[in-house]
Image: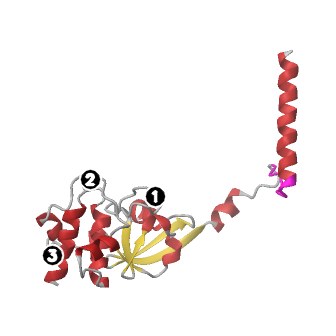
Amino acid sequence: MSETFDEATTLKRRTFVAASTAAAGLPLLTSDRLPTSRRASAERVSTVRLTVNGEQHTAEVDNRTSLLDLLREHLDLPGTKKGCDQGACGACTVLVDDRRVNACLTLAVMHQGAHVTTVEGLAEGEQLHPLQQAFIDHDGLQCGYCTPGQLMSGVACIAEGHTRSREEIREWMSGNLCRCGAYTNIVSAIEQTAKEG
């Protein structure tokens, strides 16, 4: 009895899958219709050349590789953090041609020839960037996970001239989340750095 039931169920499932695929106009992928792995993988790989923190880099990457994964996995720059991986938290913020970008939401191949700045590129040797020093002075970090993205957005916020008031700084930094709640200190750090020029 159970064998008959299982056979009937299997047939119904197969019939359902075939019928629904046909109704949707999608071809059934059988093994003879699948692309060869060589051709498919060759079509998915590109050579990306870009300048990161003043150094030129070339990497062979899958076309689906995000800028974030290129930086972390291929160029060994782990300062840029992977937070939500959906562009909602800002932990992966970098500057691309001096504009802030969520690195998790953009593909590496889209930035051929671009100039990228990550948190590792802010300091000059042992000399911290003024905003990095201000984060220390104002205790603008707690766990530190969001700090690289906060710093990169803060640098852009200052460069864009969005520092006329604390409210304006908050508005232009609203894409960067801090789970520890250090927002007041982050705003103070950006405000100080902007005033000092």
Q: Which amino acid does label 3 sit on?
A: Gln
Quadrant in which residue 151 is drawn: bottom left
| Residue 132 drawn at (x, y percent) | 19, 69
Question: Is residue 20 at all visible to an observer of this figure?
Answer: yes
Left or right side of 164 for 37: right
Which label is found at residue 192? 3
Nearest to viewer (mark 1 / mark 2): 2
Q: Where does the C terminus fall, quadrant-wise?
A: bottom left
**Amino acid type at image mark 2:** Cys
Helix, strand or loop at disc 2?
loop
Circles 1 and 3: CB distance less than 8 Å? no
Give, as a single range, the part of the protein colored magenta: 23-30
Of helix, strand and loop, which mostly describes the magenta segment? loop
Numbered badge on residue 113 = none
Is 72 on the left-hand or right-hand side of 145? right
Where does residue 186 sit, x and y in percent of width and height?
22, 66
